[in-house]
């Protein structure tokens, strides 16, 4: 006995249903990553693209930085960052190079491997040396941050703008410090760096560091 025939219409309907179930809506296009740039005299001196990894181009040095953990390979040298209670120590091939310490007002202190102060950047964008002498101040506008001859776009973080334009720090340190700060801002959006209050007093970094070592 032959089985009952299946109509062509039923076969076509089943095929259409199966085809519809197999299709999915295309993923919406991802928004482009924000780009932070510093320009001086018409030339781009720094370019940071946050992400995993973070991409940095400082003074012509193209760097790819992992942020969790903080790590970077430059030629045969390996850079890394070790977080501790007193800040993040940047190491080159395992040897301490500088230490970054976030201040309570969202500024950043930079120390040498022996604990001596190098630079201090306050939340309102003032850059001072170890003696507390102000070298430069960041001036925010509606669309950019002006620091000396440099103009920084893509961020309102004055400290970040100062860090990526600081010639006192080598490109590798500026790149690591910038990507590390951006990574912390993404991980803790509630504690994102603020611009601070203009004219905020500079702390005495030397006396504080000396007191901490006693």
Image (spheres, rainbow, N blue to C red):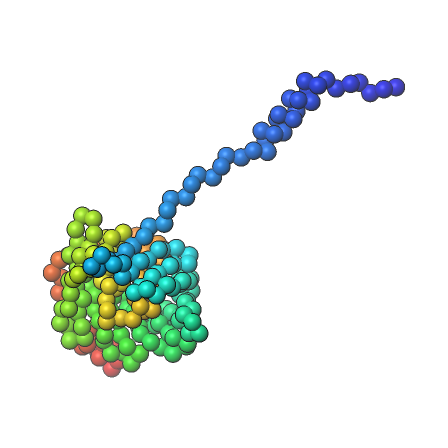
Q: Does the image show residue 31?
A: yes
Q: Position of residue 101 (x, y in %)?
A: 28, 68
Q: Nearer the viewer, residue 97 or 108?
A: 97
> Which residue is at 63% across, 29% downward?
18
> Which residue is at 20% across, 59% downward?
41
> Which residue is at 28% across, 77% downward?
112
* Tally of numbered tags: 0
- Left or right position of 38 against 28: left
Instruction: Name the image quarter holding the C terminus.
Output: bottom left
- Left or right position of 103 against 186: left
Q: Position of residue 158 (x, y in %)?
A: 22, 58
Residue 132: quadrant of the picture: bottom left
- Left or right position of 81 against 21: left
* Up-down relation of residue 1 to residue 140 (above or below): above
Q: Does the image show residue 107?
A: no
Q: Nearer the viewer, residue 190 or 30?
A: 30
Instruction: Name the image quarter holding the N terminus.
Output: top right
* Up-down relation of residue 200 to residue 115 (above or below): above
* Up-down relation of residue 57 to residue 21 (above or below): below
Q: Position of residue 159 (x, y in %)?
A: 23, 61
Q: Nearer the viewer, residue 121 or 84?
A: 121
């Amino acid at each position: 006995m032959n089985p009952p025939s299946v109509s062509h219409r039923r076969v076509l309907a089943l095929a259409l249903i199966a085809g519809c179930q197999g299709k999915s809506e295309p993923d919406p296009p991802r928004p482009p990553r924000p780009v932070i740039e510093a320009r001086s005299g018409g030339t781009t001196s720094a370019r940071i693209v946050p992400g995993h990894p973070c991409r940095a181009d400082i003074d012509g040095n193209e760097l790819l930085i992992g942020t969790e953990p903080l790590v970077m390979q430059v030629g045969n040298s390996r850079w890394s960052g070790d977080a501790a209670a007193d800040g993040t120590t940047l190491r080159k091939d395992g040897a301490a190079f500088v230490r970054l310490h976030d201040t309570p007002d969202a500024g950043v202190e930079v120390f040498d491997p022996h604990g001596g102060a190098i630079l201090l950047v306050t939340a309102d964008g003032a850059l001072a040396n170890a003696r507390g002498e102000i070298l430069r101040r960041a001036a925010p506008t509606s669309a950019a941050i002006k620091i000396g001859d440099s103009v920084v776009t893509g961020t309102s973080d004055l400290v970040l703008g100062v860090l990526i334009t600081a010639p006192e720090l080598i490109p590798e340190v500026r790149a690591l410090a910038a990507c590390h700060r951006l990574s912390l801002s993404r991980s803790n959006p509630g504690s994102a760096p603020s611009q601070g209050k203009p004219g905020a007093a500079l702390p005495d970094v030397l006396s504080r560091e000396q007191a901490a070592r006693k």
